[in-house]
Amino acid sequence: KNGNKISSVDSLPDDVEWIDSLGRTNDGFAFTYYTEKGNMLAEIDIETLELKNTTNINNFTGYLSTIVPGNEDYSFFLSSSEGLFGKKGDELEEVINWIDSDLNGDNILQVFPLENGDFIAIIIEDESVKAYNLTKRDVSELSDTVIVTLGTCYIDEQLSSLISEFNRENTDCRIKVKNYDKYNTEENEYTGAGEQLNNDILKGEGPDIIDASSFENYAV
């Protein structure tokens, strides 16, 4: 209440360079931080103040923003510029993809889960702050919609805005993004994106449109 420190966490790894975000979970706290190993996610036991469930999240695409308490299905939610992810057991599952929801993830300020399963997303749009109620749609509603897949390794704010605007204005056709950057890891020396794109093309599952400029540093 008065701003005084009431406790401290002494179990942080020695190689922590900075902390990105900190938020409440259903039973404690979680935070993301950066070390020489890359982006990490850890939970804090509220009673012992010890770290638990430390996870490497280098395969996340986009920048990480906020952590908010979960619901009956997830212990907490982690928001990135690409989507909202829920922590279930040892796994992080994508719950919302911002572009699929016609929103620019770079401008998401905060997300709140509702008891009915919906979410409220607070976003900066058209130089003002807006709130959107997000409700899960049945896939059958898109049965008559043509889905055009865009393959890329990088989604900047301009591209995200253009795709979201297109999807909002068109009911018969939608653009769905496949971000290949998630296939790049230290283990494959960041060649995974190009390799996965090549494999998809050979299997006849390649994207309809390829953002070639984003793959310029990879062998395709």
Image: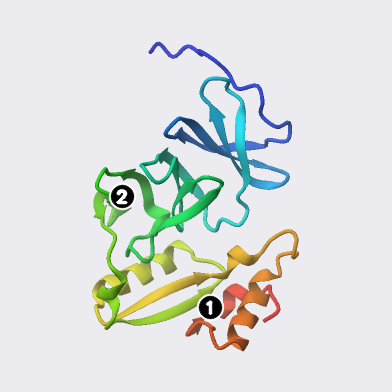
* Residue at 75% in and 60% down: 187
Q: Who's the residue at 28% across and 68% down the image? A: 138
Which amino acid is tagged 2?
A: Ala
Residue 47 coordinates in the image, percent (x, y):
53, 20
SS type, badge 2: strand
Instruction: Give the structural element (helix, strand or loop) at label 1.
Output: loop
**Res. 121 mark:** 2
Question: Which of the colour schemes (rainbow, by chain, secondary structure, one colour) is used?
Answer: rainbow
User: Depth check: 114 or 66 in front?
Assistant: 114
Residue carrying label 1: 211
Q: Nearer the viewer, residue 131 or 87?
A: 87
Residue 30 point in image, percent of width and height: 51, 35
Give the spatial CA distance, label 1 vs label 2: 28 Å
Q: Residues within 10 Å of mark 2 (few under 14, many from 20)?
A: some
Q: Residue at x 54, y 15 (%)?
A: 7
Compare marks 1 and 2 and give the one earlier in the sequence. Answer: 2
Image quadrant where one finds the C terminus: bottom right
Q: Quadrant of the N terminus?
A: top left
As drawn, 70 above or below 186: above
Question: Residue 162: x, y in percent?
Answer: 37, 70
Q: Is residue 168 left or right of residue 175?
A: left
Report the mark closest to the observer, 1 or 2.
2
Indicate the amino acid at tag 1: Asp
Residue occupying image coordinates x 44% and y 62%? 157
The count of marks equals: 2
Residue 147 placement (x, y as % from top left): 37, 80
- Whether residue 187 sits left or right of residue 91 in the image: it is right
Classify 62 as above or below 197. Answer: above
